Amino acid sequence: MLQSNGAYYRYNVQRVESVEEFISQGNVATIKVNLTKDYTLYNSDGSIDRSSSNFKTLTVIYNMRMINGNPKIYDSKII
Protein backbone atom coordinates (compact mmCIF):
# COMPACT_ATOMS: atom_id res chain seq x y z
CA MET A 1 0.00 0.00 0.00
CA LEU A 2 2.75 2.49 0.93
CA GLN A 3 4.76 1.80 -2.18
CA SER A 4 1.75 2.05 -4.50
CA ASN A 5 1.05 5.62 -3.35
CA GLY A 6 4.72 6.66 -3.21
CA ALA A 7 5.10 6.77 0.58
CA TYR A 8 8.02 5.13 2.40
CA TYR A 9 9.61 4.72 5.83
CA ARG A 10 13.15 5.78 6.65
CA TYR A 11 14.72 4.14 9.70
CA ASN A 12 17.24 6.34 11.50
CA VAL A 13 17.88 3.93 14.38
CA GLN A 14 17.15 0.23 14.78
CA ARG A 15 19.06 -1.14 17.72
CA VAL A 16 18.81 -4.22 19.94
CA GLU A 17 19.05 -2.87 23.49
CA SER A 18 18.98 -6.23 25.25
CA VAL A 19 18.17 -9.91 24.82
CA GLU A 20 15.71 -10.91 27.53
CA GLU A 21 15.33 -14.58 26.67
CA PHE A 22 16.59 -17.13 24.16
CA ILE A 23 15.24 -20.67 23.84
CA SER A 24 16.18 -23.19 21.17
CA GLN A 25 15.10 -26.74 20.51
CA GLY A 26 16.03 -28.67 17.41
CA ASN A 27 15.73 -26.41 14.38
CA VAL A 28 13.48 -23.77 16.02
CA ALA A 29 14.30 -20.91 18.39
CA THR A 30 12.52 -18.08 20.16
CA ILE A 31 14.21 -14.85 21.17
CA LYS A 32 12.73 -12.00 23.21
CA VAL A 33 14.48 -8.65 22.68
CA ASN A 34 14.13 -4.99 23.58
CA LEU A 35 14.49 -2.85 20.45
CA THR A 36 14.81 0.88 19.91
CA LYS A 37 13.35 2.20 16.66
CA ASP A 38 13.42 5.70 15.25
CA TYR A 39 11.46 5.89 12.02
CA THR A 40 9.87 8.54 9.80
CA LEU A 41 7.06 8.09 7.27
CA TYR A 42 7.46 10.22 4.16
CA ASN A 43 4.42 10.89 1.98
CA SER A 44 4.62 10.84 -1.81
CA ASP A 45 5.14 14.62 -1.86
CA GLY A 46 8.13 14.31 0.51
CA SER A 47 6.30 15.68 3.54
CA ILE A 48 6.59 13.89 6.89
CA ASP A 49 3.56 12.11 8.33
CA ARG A 50 4.14 12.88 12.01
CA SER A 51 1.26 10.64 13.17
CA SER A 52 3.05 7.59 11.70
CA SER A 53 6.61 8.55 12.71
CA ASN A 54 8.03 7.60 16.09
CA PHE A 55 11.01 6.97 18.37
CA LYS A 56 10.32 4.18 20.83
CA THR A 57 11.65 1.15 22.65
CA LEU A 58 9.57 -2.00 22.50
CA THR A 59 9.75 -5.69 23.35
CA VAL A 60 9.46 -8.17 20.49
CA ILE A 61 9.36 -11.97 20.47
CA TYR A 62 10.77 -13.53 17.29
CA ASN A 63 10.17 -17.17 16.38
CA MET A 64 12.82 -18.56 14.04
CA ARG A 65 13.42 -21.76 12.13
CA MET A 66 16.58 -23.03 10.44
CA ILE A 67 16.16 -23.17 6.65
CA ASN A 68 19.11 -24.29 4.53
CA GLY A 69 21.41 -23.73 7.52
CA ASN A 70 20.28 -20.14 8.15
CA PRO A 71 17.88 -18.88 10.84
CA LYS A 72 14.73 -17.34 9.33
CA ILE A 73 12.06 -15.41 11.24
CA TYR A 74 8.66 -16.97 10.62
CA ASP A 75 6.65 -15.09 13.24
CA SER A 76 7.00 -12.06 15.51
CA LYS A 77 4.89 -10.42 18.17
CA ILE A 78 5.20 -7.02 19.85
CA ILE A 79 4.36 -7.29 23.55
Image (cartoon, rainbow, N blue to C red):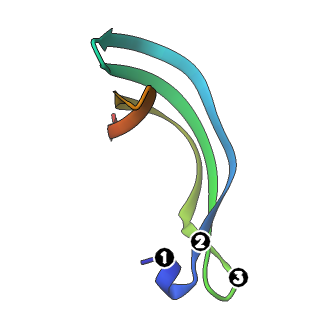
Residue at screen point 62% across, 55% down: 39
Picture quadrant where residue 8 is located: bottom right
Location of mark 3 (residue): 46
**Disc 1: CA contacts within 10 A as few (<14), some (14-19) or many (>=20):** few
| Amino acid beneath label 2 | Tyr
Picture quadrant where residue 35 is located: top right
Name the spot of residue 53 as percent of width and height, x first: 58, 61
- For the residues carrying marks 2 and 3, which lies nearer the camera in this image? 2
In this view, which residue lies farthest toward the front?
A: 68
Picture quadrant where residue 17 is located: top right
Sequence-wise, the earlier of marks 1 and 3 is 1
Location of mark 1 (residue): 2
| Amino acid beneath label 1 | Leu
Residue sitting nearer the eye, 3 or 72: 72
Name the spot of residue 50 as percent of width and height, x first: 60, 68
Q: Tell me if 58 is positioned left or right of 13 in this view.
A: left
Assign a secondary structure to mark 2: strand
